[in-house]
Amino acid sequence: MAQYGWGDLQLGRIPLRETFAATESGGDDRSLDIDGQESSPPLTRAQVIARHDGINSMAPGQVIPVTFTDKPERNGYYTVKTAASTYTEYRTEMVTADWKVSLDRVGSDAETDLQSRLTGATRLNDFALAGERWHVPPIGHYGYVTGATNPGTMTRTGADGAITVYRGVPANVSPRWGCPPTSYLTGRVRVTTTGGQEVYGSDVPLAATGWSLTNGLINVTWSASGGGSLDVQSYTGGAYRTKPWAVFATSGTQVVSWDGATLLRNDPEAAILRLTKSLAPGRLTLDLTLRRGSRFVEGYMQRNTSADELKVRLVTAETNVTTLASAGYVTATGNDSDGNRFAAGSARTFTGHANGGVAKANTTSLDFWLGVVAGGGSAVAGDAATDLRNQYIACMPEAVYGVRR
């Protein structure tokens, strides 16, 4: 509930103080115009800035869920027309963000299907793999349909609850599904920055340290301790289980800190975060992609000149069969203390690292994935190491649209 008894207005992921007036008009499109102010106090300065940046990051044509506390009849899905916010700093006293948003109504969840357009092709790979097409809508969705052929299902339980994974989604099909606007954000991908503040857009400042990328099943963050470059935490058994990974720009040059972080994409279904490290001269970039419902984070490492070796490997060695690299992945041979097994791989030919990981010599780029076999030797179908490999090969870019039923 908002401060001082005001209602809450949720524009996509952006929480705002509900305003008294919501101006609507009919005609060719049913529009909704709303405006308001966020301020510190009572919010923190970081919260006001995050809301200001989030409003200005809303893209025309973007479909978002909108919910009201005191005007629930207006709840539904809307298309963004325009969005603007004016930031005012009253030095040492107050910070305000005066915002205005203009929307076109698509409809309530009872009259609106969300359509996931899964585009692109199976990842080019050196292992003759077709991969497995899969898709995950929000927790709380209903009426999932893919035409005449139904996909299989499995359930993964994360920090947000149980989420349904659809496996074997037919090719050349855009799944449709319904979802109450109040449930749309559950199970989403979230990016946070220093202090745990969620980032609401992509064109916003992001700290090089203190960030995290999570979907409730995987939490990826900078490694503050443990000797790694990244900390890939997997949610199993009711808690996140940490596993530090070391990133190497050459065979002997580990990245122990990052110089910059920026967002290339930040949507509930997927986010892409880019990390940059100076090599003096030159630089290394690492793009991390996390999708809703995924058990692994995808990585793409690139430097401007050919390295003797690019690699990402576990900080603490775990027994694994490196020869499995010939099949596109490596995994532990036994369960760790949490009852899980690490898994990693690449779409292109690589060398399995003795610690557990992926390495490639004489190259300027390396694609990889890092994840967990939840349940280890007793993993359910869909969570085995080969399943994760196949899902990585067939990850489909997703864009969500609202369509009338």
Image: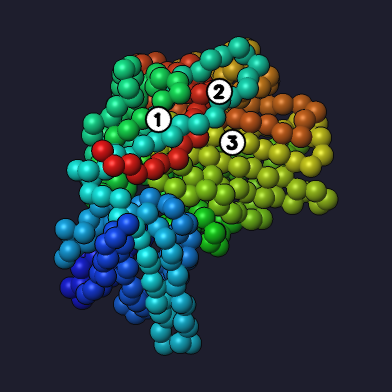
**Vertical placement of 278 versus 381: above or below?**
below
Q: Quadrant of residue 110?
A: top left
- x 54%, y 44%: residue: 272
- Choose top left, top right, bottom left or bottom right for residue 355: top right
Discs 1/2, front: 1
Circle nearer the N terminus (2, 3): 2
Calculate the distance from the C-alpha at mark 1 to the C-alpha at mark 2.
16 Å
Q: How many marks?
A: 3
Instruction: Report the disc number at residue 299.
Output: 3
Question: Residue 222: image x %, image y %?
Answer: 54, 48
Residue 380 found in image quarter? top left
Q: Which residue is mark 1?
A: 174
Image point (45%, 20%), residue name? 171
Nearer to us in this view, 262 or 396: 396
Q: Which type of secondary structure does the marked residue at label 1 adopt?
A: loop
Determine contact: label 1, label 2, CB under 8 Å: no
224 on left or right of 18: right
One can see residue 194 in this view: no
Residue at coordinates 42% horizontally, 87% vertically from top-left? 93
Question: Picture coordinates of residue 216 (x, y %)?
Answer: 36, 41
Quarter placement of the N terminus? bottom left
The quarter of the image holding the C terminus is top left
**Circle 3 crowding by C-alpha within 10 Å: few under 14, some 14–19, many from 20:** many
In primary-sequence order, the first of circles 1 and 2 is 2
Question: Disc number at residue 122?
Answer: 2
